Amino acid sequence: MIPVDLITGFLGAGKTTFLLRYARYLLSLGLKIGILVYDHGAVNVDLPLLNPLRSERCELETLAASCDTDCHRRRFRTKLLAMAMCGYDRILIEPSGVFDMDEFYDTLADSPLDRMLSVGNVLCIVDAKLPEDSLPEEDFFLASQAACAGCVILSRVQLASEEERDSTLSHLERALTAIHSVTISSDRLLARDWDSLTGEDYERFSRCGAFPPDYQKSLIGAGGFQSLSFLNLPLDEVALREKTRTLFADTGYGRILRVKGVFPEGEGWFQLNATAHATQVEHAEQGLPVITVIGRELNENAINILLTGKAPRLHIL
């Protein structure tokens, strides 16, 4: 059977960046891999970072979880059935940051996938600069994903102080306790600058395994998290940075957790990734010019006016 690795982590933790590094390691071993990027928004905006991986030995697939729970579960199962017949040595899945871990285990246990695919490794990415002001719903996804992980990997360690790293680990422990799950042992944790990771580290990731869900479930589906996507915004990098700061600073737009997307400027393309405490802009391959805003209790009208200069159109049925 083909092993399936899940690269999980809450919104903005750095899953796509890690996946790029991990996939390159697997490709260096001569493996043929398939990658499924499973986004919470209606439009997938993470592919430009992964496009350099495309080759005869690496294929990329996408899935949008913008429909209801039953619908996207069917799409997930159908996509995995198709991938199971492609002759991959391994399949990697990067789900949404608000992914229900039961969906992963339940889908792979469903016939006929249970005879074609197997649970490989669950790797959970946790931001070393984890904010303290998270809501219980956010902590549920953080903890439930970490509870199933064979290895929890801290991101942005080189940017975090020792106090911030300790605070993050304490926060994770509290979140695990809240869902009645066990503490992550030290042998399941890695906290190091990703630029210093070695082949031995990646071999460890590729063999760390996974833990079945064992916690008190308090949310169904995406837990009230929403996303809005905007195509062809007439904004350059300076304007995007300014408006992104406004979204995070003003609670009138809702509780904004992530802003991400791809935009053109000059003769190049760039990828925007922003959380409340950090905004990154990197070069990207040409992609779909879309910006996605993810959060809770989003004020769609206000966000539209800020980003497009006009209110959303009314849909008359």
Image (cartoon, rainbow, N blue to C red):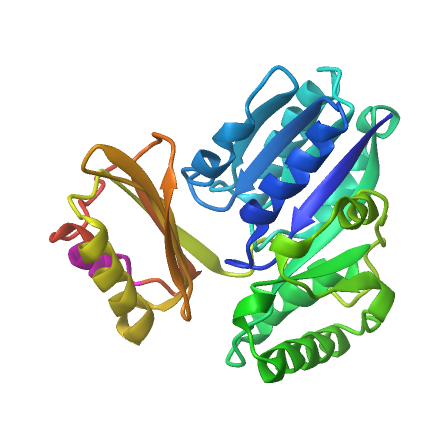
Q: For the stretch drawn in magenta, what is the main secondary structure?
A: helix
Give above or below for 232 relative to 185. Answer: above
Question: On the rendered structure, is 118 left or right of 82?
Answer: right
Q: Residue at x 62, y 42 (%)?
A: 21
Question: On the rendered structure, is 226 left or right of 240?
Answer: right
Q: Residue at x 85, y 30 (%)?
A: 114
Quadrant of the snapshot with the C terminus: top left
Q: In x, y percent, where is residue 38?
A: 56, 39
Q: In x, y percent, where is residue 291?
A: 32, 46
Q: In x, y percent, where is residue 14?
A: 55, 54
Q: In x, y percent, where is residue 123?
A: 73, 51
Q: Residue at x 77, y 35 (%)?
A: 4
Extreme residue in the left direction: 309
In this rendered view, identify the residue nearer to me: 259 or 202. 202
Please give the count of numbered marks on the rendered protein: 0
In this rendering, does residue 109 appear at all?
no
Q: Residue at x 69, y 81 (%)?
A: 170
In this rendering, does residue 247 appear at all?
yes
In this rendered view, identify the residue nearer to me: 316 or 105. 105
Give above or below for 225 relative to 285. Answer: below
Q: Which residues are magenta?
A: 299-306
Quadrant of the snapshot with the N terminus: top right
